[in-house]
Amino acid sequence: MFRIDNLQYAKWSEKIFRQLREGGVDAVHVTIAYHENFRETVLNFAQWNRWFEQFPDLICHGEWASDVQKAHDTGRTAVFFGFQNPSPIEDDIGLVQVLHKLGARFMQLSYNNQSLLATGCYEAEDPGITRMGRQVIKEMNRVGMVIDMSHSADRSTIEAADISQRPITITHANLHSWQPALRNKRDAVVRAVVQNGGMMGFSLYPHHLRDKSACTLHSFCEMVARAAEQFGAQHFGIGSDLCQDQPDSVVEWMRVGRWTKEIDYGEGSASAPGFPPMPDWFRDNRDFGTLETGLREIGFDADEVAGLMGDNWHRFYAENFTPT
Amino acid sequence: MFRIDNLQYAKWSEKIFRQLREGGVDAVHVTIAYHENFRETVLNFAQWNRWFEQFPDLICHGEWASDVQKAHDTGRTAVFFGFQNPSPIEDDIGLVQVLHKLGARFMQLSYNNQSLLATGCYEAEDPGITRMGRQVIKEMNRVGMVIDMSHSADRSTIEAADISQRPITITHANLHSWQPALRNKRDAVVRAVVQNGGMMGFSLYPHHLRDKSACTLHSFCEMVARAAEQFGAQHFGIGSDLCQDQPDSVVEWMRVGRWTKEIDYGEGSASAPGFPPMPDWFRDNRDFGTLETGLREIGFDADEVAGLMGDNWHRFYAENFTPT
């Protein structure tokens, strides 16, 4: 049984690497690009190479599902890389394979805005997957880079699920029927993803939770139970969206990048522009045990809990990271 | 017994890939950067990815010594990548590991001119390995990228051989005592390289040959025999420097890059600025059998011929491409 968190964007430090170990996290998918171009993204790969060299007893580079087992066996956390935006490939489809070779395993086709590939969830209109988007989906399928539609608009997401020859993901979001946040997913979107073998990771980011930071563990687990009942527990896991220790300047970077000179509050507001406080039952990586207890208490059996806590992501990794 | 050519810079095409097969070449180390910066070099990796996808029956990407065996077993040529200049790492030591991950296995510390790391063989003064050069040598040793001093000046080469904790190479040059070309290597330089387990590849580029394009196979093989006697046959192989089908504009790019607005003729001259014609006994990859016959006839035994034609490079690959 593995414990996997399929989305974090922490301000990484030895402290957090040690907390990953305390929380028994075997693998984590980390965002290494929001708005970075190719060269800037390479700087982020290089920074991780330094951390792997500096903290070899705590973390290792995750490339394949087998690295989760290796990390588990050696008491470390395997770190897998992904992008929340296709900006790292710029306008060059050849960079998909190059970045997969460097370790990129997930890439969102859009982040809130229209991209060269797909529409983001904050746009007024969603014309669906673009010409380049269709080509890049095919190339991602070929090399083994997973399509992530967490921040994409509904039509684009449903089209991506249909066009893609391999399962796609929503790495971090919750059910819109539980909490009608713009980023949470309507049933038709979830269905399009899971009916092709895709996966969705449940988010613990307060803007995606009912009652935000005051959300209870019980309410969250009820939402997981409802999703499992509706779509099948095997299609779900965790993508906590933990942004631990990031200064508020980073949430501004996530929201505005370089695409505007004006402030865009995204899921926040003028009166609450920064990162919201995490719920008290999930402060950081040390609380995965609490989450697991909550899932057991809501009525999941041992296999389902194991799947939701990591085994489902592990199976998905095994099937989707290698070239066709 | 493997056949390996450890340096070519052809204008690659299906025709040449087929000639590699006709010549029984199991592996070739190809130059993919002369003056390219990081981003330009990535375009060259991406171009090769396209060729691997287009010609899967002829070529495959070579990353490890085991890929030479795989290529041999499947009737293909494994293509290994290298740079004749450290320009791809720009001023960023983090790019050494990134480029090794993408497949770079050899990097010259300088190309004719002074670089950030070492002095080139055309400079008037050679102050030896620089501060950054010492750091980059250590990093190349760590990740398994091989130091190549083919176009470097003597002092820099000898210092690199001494500073490096792993063997270094001169991938393509001949003995200065046989043909006193600026690019050929004096005994003290060859000795510094081989006494630390390093390797040298003999060049078939006419400017490095006695009598240039009119050089005889017998004269070339006598030079190989002399080198083997003096330094040990196990330290030598082939690095033909074959630049097949390249237009003369490419030799100008090799010589002047973007570092000057004036013409620099390098090993050529105003009256003969282009690529010189190859000797008639080594027109292209189909003539490796002729070369092998020449080595046998000069008196090498079967093991020595096998070593010179590829097994020595294969052994070197096995020992030097993996991280420490």
Image: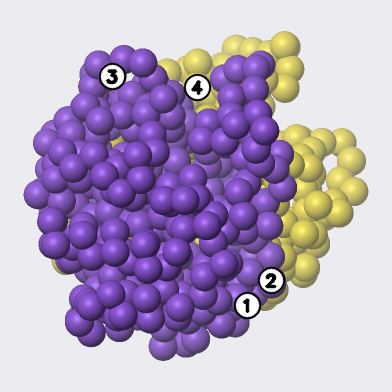
Chain colours: A yellow, B purple
Q: Earlier in the sequence, mark 2 or mark 3?
A: 2
Question: Are both tags, 3 and 4, on one chain?
Answer: no
Q: Is residue A258 among the parts visible in the rendering?
A: yes
Residue B254 position in % (x across, y down): 57, 36
Amino acid type at image mark 4: Val
Mark 1 and mark 2 residues within 8 Å of each other at the beta carbon: yes
User: Image height check: is A291 above or below B4?
Assistant: above
Instruction: For label 1, count other residues whose C-alpha is less than 10 Å away and answer few (under 14), some (14-19) or many (20+).
Output: some
Indicate the secondary structure of the residue bearing disc 4.
helix
On the image, numbered disc 1 is attached to which residue?
B18
Instruction: For label 4, count other residues whose C-alpha is less than 10 Å away and answer few (under 14), some (14-19) or many (20+).
Output: some
On the image, numbered disc 2 is attached to which residue?
B14
Distance between the alpha carbons at the discs numbered 3 and 4: 47 Å
On the image, numbered disc 4 is attached to which residue?
A250
- Judged by depth in the image, the label closer to the viewer, 3 or 4, is 3
Indicate the secondary structure of the residue bearing disc 1.
helix
Distance between the alpha carbons at the discs numbered 2 and 3: 42 Å
Indicate the secondary structure of the residue bearing disc 2.
helix
Residue at horizontal 55 percent and vertical 76 percent from the top: B286
Chain of the residue that carries numbered disc 2 in the rendered image = B
Residue at horizontal 65 percent and vertical 17 percent from the top: B262
On the image, numbered disc 3 is attached to which residue?
B126
Distance between the alpha carbons at the discs numbered 1 and 3: 42 Å
Question: Are both tags, 2 and 3, on one chain?
Answer: yes
Q: Earlier in the sequence, mark 1 or mark 3?
A: 1
Indicate the secondary structure of the residue bearing disc 3.
loop
Amino acid type at image mark 2: Glu
Amino acid type at image mark 3: Asp
Q: Quadrant of residue A76?
A: bottom left
Distance between the alpha carbons at the discs numbered 1 and 2: 6 Å
Distance between the alpha carbons at the discs numbered 4 and 1: 53 Å
